[in-house]
Amino acid sequence: MTTEQTQSIQVEDDRSGLGIETLRRAIADNLFYLQGKWPEIATLNDFYMALANTVRDRLMPRWLNTIRNYRRSEVRVVAYLSAEFLLGPHLGIKLINLGIEELVRQAVADSGLALEDLLAQEEEPGLGNGGLGRLAACYMESLATLEIPAIGYGIRYEFGIFDQELRDGWQVEVTDKWLQYGNPWEIPRPESAVMVRFGGRTEAYTDDEGAYRVRWIPARVVKGVPYDTPIVGYYVNTTNTLRLWRAEAAESFNFQAFNQGDYYGAVDQKIYSENLTKVLYPNDEPLQGKQLRLEQQYFFVSCALQDMIRLHRGAGGDLRQFHQKFAVQLNDTHPAVAVAELMRLLVDEHRLPWDAAWEVSQSTFGFTNHTLLPEALEKWPLPLFGSLLPRHLEIIYEINQRFLDQARVHFLGDSQKLAQLSLIDESGERYVRMAHLACVGSHAINGVAELHSELLKQTVLKDFYQLWPQKFQNKTNGVTPRRWLLLCNPRLSQLITEHIGTDWVCQLEQLRQLEAYAEDREFQRQWRQIKRAVKQDLADHIQQTLNIAINPDSLFDIQVKRIHEYKRQHLNVLHIITLYNRIRRNPDIDIVPRTFIFGGKAAPGYIMAKLMIKVITSVAEVVNNDPQVCDRIKVVFLPDYNVTNSQPVYPAADLSEQISTAGKEASGTGNMKFSLNGALTIGTLDGANVEIRQAVGAENFFLFGLTIEEVQQLQESGYNPWDYYNRTPDLKEAINLINSGFFSHGNRELFKPLVDSLVYDDPYLLLADYSAYIDCQDTVGQRFRETDTWTRMSILNSARMGYFSSDRAIREYCQDIWHVTPISVQLKPYVQADA
Ligand code: NBY
């Protein structure tokens, strides 16, 4: 060692140790110095915080070295723009990805604590609604694991998705105060704050060189402060950053304002500004015309682009090469205003010529669409858009004009086509069409499952497909095997590893080696034993929390997802009532005992979805308390379905309900989590179900229901649900029982909106699919009794799910859209010179 080295301190030395004794001391140290507690008076949460900080210290060298790497100008970085990141709890996955779970378990045990109890303390960051937000989280994890330089940009909502409580069987929303005990996983970076402008007007002027320019004179300014969260890859040094923005008042409350007497003006400004990132909109479809929502979107997009431009220029980059530094992905249309904002930044602020700026923008953006429901396509009333973002509206007009000039050549004389393509909807009240802006501004457009991507080309984006077929791609969704198998199902993971080694964790296709054991009696026995143990755990949890006794040997039939008519939780309810009627009609009937488990939140303003929850809980109350049936059917509604609560659910399922009307579910990702954990699927030919069925084999999948073509035909030929109701006795009996007040203490009004909607309208074709569903469920019941067959099918499901890893999905995005390659991060210690 040279003298210079001996005189320097490696700052991480004392906080990076992984010996059990070192860890134990670090936790005690953090408890004392950060929480200000000693063990005798510390709460479980204090211990959780002490442990979280211990783990955070240990990932810091990886994180800092990763950041250092990305500042290098030649490194191309993925920027994933999403209004939602539904990460789920951090601690468990970080322990696993750092490979220190067992060490920490031991260190914690030596302090007399159980790791599971500390894990249970964490308040998850519920910064998303459902599939779209969770997909962003899986993708961030895979990006890190694959050593891809990436940054996630989003919003640091002070209140995430509401907590769901059930009162008298109804959903009640409770504010999600996830930050109330502090968040050990984020670091605020106030020094990197940026300013975001709103409202006001624009003004033309001539610059020093005599060029025509526009300046924007805003009405108000809000400060965006970034909060960084590390995303740790599995057994790699790469630790990427999720950078979430919080809105603050631009002028902090100051004495000058006070002295001038404008105390309330300053306070009002602060309150107004901070409102911006106060709460996540809890809808999984857009609410048209909510100004605050557009403000949120523009706010985080502007913060993100300003941040990227600063990084790029800081590394000596030229803005004409911006697209070589960043590949920006738009997660649905929520960040689509980025197309106009990047043009504004390049043209107005950095004085690039329009054409050069447009080249850069188009080469920068990719756009992922997540829905086919036409009512879910985001559009903003033009007056609202123009008053909030006057300069952006001008830029959108300019983009539109140039775009339509180009389209006019392609669709000669077809003015209707041009009206359909336009970024502005002028068919009635005028709107800005965000999907059109995203399509025009991106070089790649993708759907999230094969079927969905095909339908996009034929329906909602048909005109764009005709114009630019080469822009369209498919990227079938995937889920991360670290959280959705290794973490949530340790028993099954261990069994798998004992037989095929550990490579499956990062090469999920390796699971295929399990096919060799599908018929192996001993392996089957172990597989069943694990499923049984996991079901027992869930049964115990349900007993303790809901006081419902369920039989762990019954068939666990599970539907967990947002509550929506198109997802058809009420079709599942019709099946339950049908079984109930069969038992009442014939008390000695021999049917497979089933436990029906539901979970999911309804958008607070979606009355029908809330009524669907009430019908589930009402049927549960009757069925669970009927001595004649309750040993054969149980119905459970798990309250507050979120990432944390979902982790024990997927492993315990025998049957996964994926029963949306064909053509309505873009992909689904819960379907993948279930199958990966050895559940069989009952499902329609919708979304990724189609590919899952292909992968696992048609013989290992319970298919039912109308196809998309049949749905279309039926609707075109005049679908009449009333006929189905009248000619299907079991269906009629089930619906009549709801209608009679049987499940609502004699109240015949309660479920009338639901029943009427089904019998007179039925937009999601439950009645048309009812018989096929019931028949298919009967087959499920019979097959469940053939224990060995069922087990073989279950093993084959897991064995063939390799394709549905988010690692595969991310590799495809990297190759086909982002053109980025992995870079491994070297751990160079940060050496601080001593004096
Ligand atoms: O995205 C879901 C799709 O329904 C599902 O099929 C797909 O698997 C998943 C991932 O690709 N979409 C979804 O979750 N959408 C939302 O959560 C959402 C949230 C907010 C808004 C719209 C949709 N919004 O406009 O406010």
Image (cartoon, helix red, strand yellow):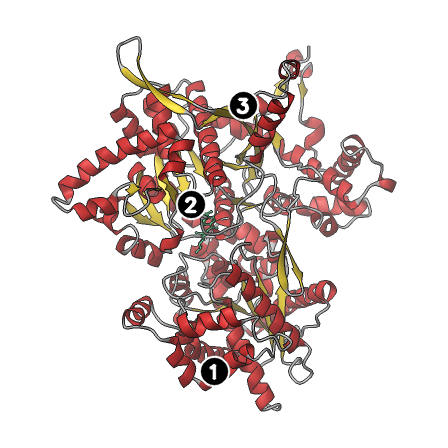
Query: Could you tell which of marks 2 and 1 lies nearer the N-terminus?
Result: 1
Residue 371 appears in the rendering:
no
Q: Position of residue 488 (x, y in %)?
A: 60, 55
Residue 205 appears in the rendering:
yes
Q: Nearer the viewer, residue 464 or 645?
A: 464
Instruction: Give the residue type that dot 2 points to.
Output: Ile
Residue drawn where x is 42% and y is 75% of the image: 767
Answer with the quarter of the image where residue 275 lies.
top right
User: Label 2, on which residue?
Assistant: 810
Q: Secondary structure at mark 2?
A: helix
Q: Which is in the foreground here, disc 1 or disc 3?
A: 1
Asked if residue 184 is positioned above or below residue 603 in the image, the reply reads above
Q: How many marks?
A: 3
Query: Residue 732: which disc?
Result: 1
User: Label 3, on which residue?
Assistant: 192
Instruction: Give the residue type that dot 1 points to.
Output: Lys
Query: Could you tell which of marks 2 and 3 lies nearer the N-terminus?
Result: 3
Q: Quadrant of the C terminus?
A: top right
Q: Which is in the foreground here, disc 2 or disc 3?
A: 3
- Horizontal side of residue 419 vs 595, given as left or right: left
- Circle 1 packing at 10 Å, graded few (<14), some (14-19), many (20+), is some
Answer with the quarter of the image where residue 170 lies.
bottom right
- Horizontal side of residue 428 vs 627, given as left or right: left
Answer with the quarter of the image where residue 602 lies.
bottom right
Q: Position of residue 117 (x, y in %)?
A: 74, 51
- Circle 2 packing at 10 Å, graded few (<14), some (14-19), many (20+), is many
Give the Cα separation between the discs numbered 2 and 1: 47 Å
